[in-house]
Amino acid sequence: MPDKVELRVDGLKVLRGGREVLHGVSIALRPGEITTLLGANGAGKSSLMMAVAGVLPIASGKIALGDRSLAGLPPDIVRRAGVAVVAEGHPVLNHLSVHDNLRAAGLLLPKADAEKEVAEALNLFPELRPRLTVAASNLSGGQKQMVNIAQALIARPRYLLVDELSFGLAPAILVRLADSIRSIAARGVGILLIEQFTTLALSLASRAYVMERGQITFDGTSAELHKNPEILHGAYLATVSDAS
């Protein structure tokens, strides 16, 4: 039976440095669906992602995976519950080999399960197979992003939060990574995609939110946003606070 558990954020408020940067934000993610969160730098997008992941404390509001509250839980528990993050800048364990990076992501799983998930990740990114013994520091930016996504998948997430998939990457690599995002969603994993490259984001996502100054200003389909470009235009031209 398909997973029908939603990841919901309701009325979320977050403080950073004593200042409120998220003002009652509400979003909902669904299994197997790609949702994008758009907005200018400083709009609060990364703050929202970090709060959901347990990295930032929340002042008020709810974060829940189905009936389970995730609010206030530390990042490792959130990850075990089924929410994994692909962080901006494709960070990897530079001093370890590619294979050891993948193995490290499976340390919380039984050995046989971890080996299975590593194998599945390499099926998704076969380009990494000939690089398994290479130190991660010697990978290209695109290869590091593949490792980053693979590490998140090895945790067996129900939901994947992807912060700036396109960061520093060439267009040809983005086409390849876009295909992988579609494949992951087709497995039933819900995806939240934060992305400055709006054309890429809207081509991948079926649903979209626009955030401006710590508030959601649009909630609808990607098709609706395509038909109303002034919504995005206004969000990106708005005076930007340092919310994120």
Image: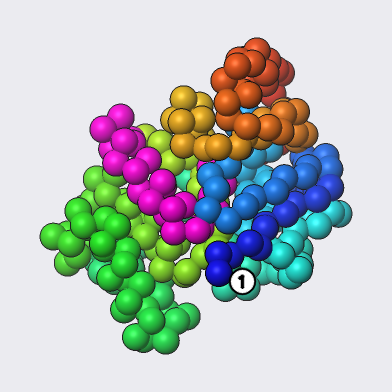
**Residue at position x 77%, y 34% from top?**
215
The overriding secondary structure of the stretch rendered in magenta is helix
> Where does the magenta region start and end?
169-193
| Percent x, y of residue 34 | 53, 44
Is 113 drawn above or below residue 201 in the view shown? below
Residue 43 seen by the camera: no
The answer to whether 239 is drawn above or below residue 95 in the figure is above
Q: Residue at x 51, y 58 (%)?
A: 189
Quadrant containing the N terminus in the rendered view: bottom right
Viewer-nearest residue: 155 or 93:
155
**Residue 240 visible in rendering:** yes
The type of colouring in the image is rainbow
Q: What is the tally of numbered marks visible in this picture?
A: 1
Q: Quick check: 5 left or right of 112?
A: right
- In percent of the image, x 29 and y 57: which residue is there? 124
- Looking at the image, which residue sits at the far front? 1
Q: Residue furthest left?
A: 130
Q: Amino acid at mark 1?
A: Ala
The image shows residue 90 at horizontal and vertical percentages of 40, 49
Image coords of residue 72 (percent x, y): 76, 65
Left or right: residue 184 versus residue 101 is right
The vertical placement of 75 against 26, above or below, is below
Q: Residue at x 44, y 53 (%)?
A: 186
Residue corresponding to mark 1: 81
Relative to residue 114, is residue 217 drawn left or right?
right
Compare residues 13 and 68 and report the one nearer the observer: 68
**SS at badge 1:** helix
Q: Residue 10 location, x and y as percent?
A: 80, 50
Q: Is residue 188 magenta?
A: yes
Residue 218's image quarter?
top right
Q: Is residue 244 magenta?
A: no
> Where's the C terminus, which quadrant?
top right
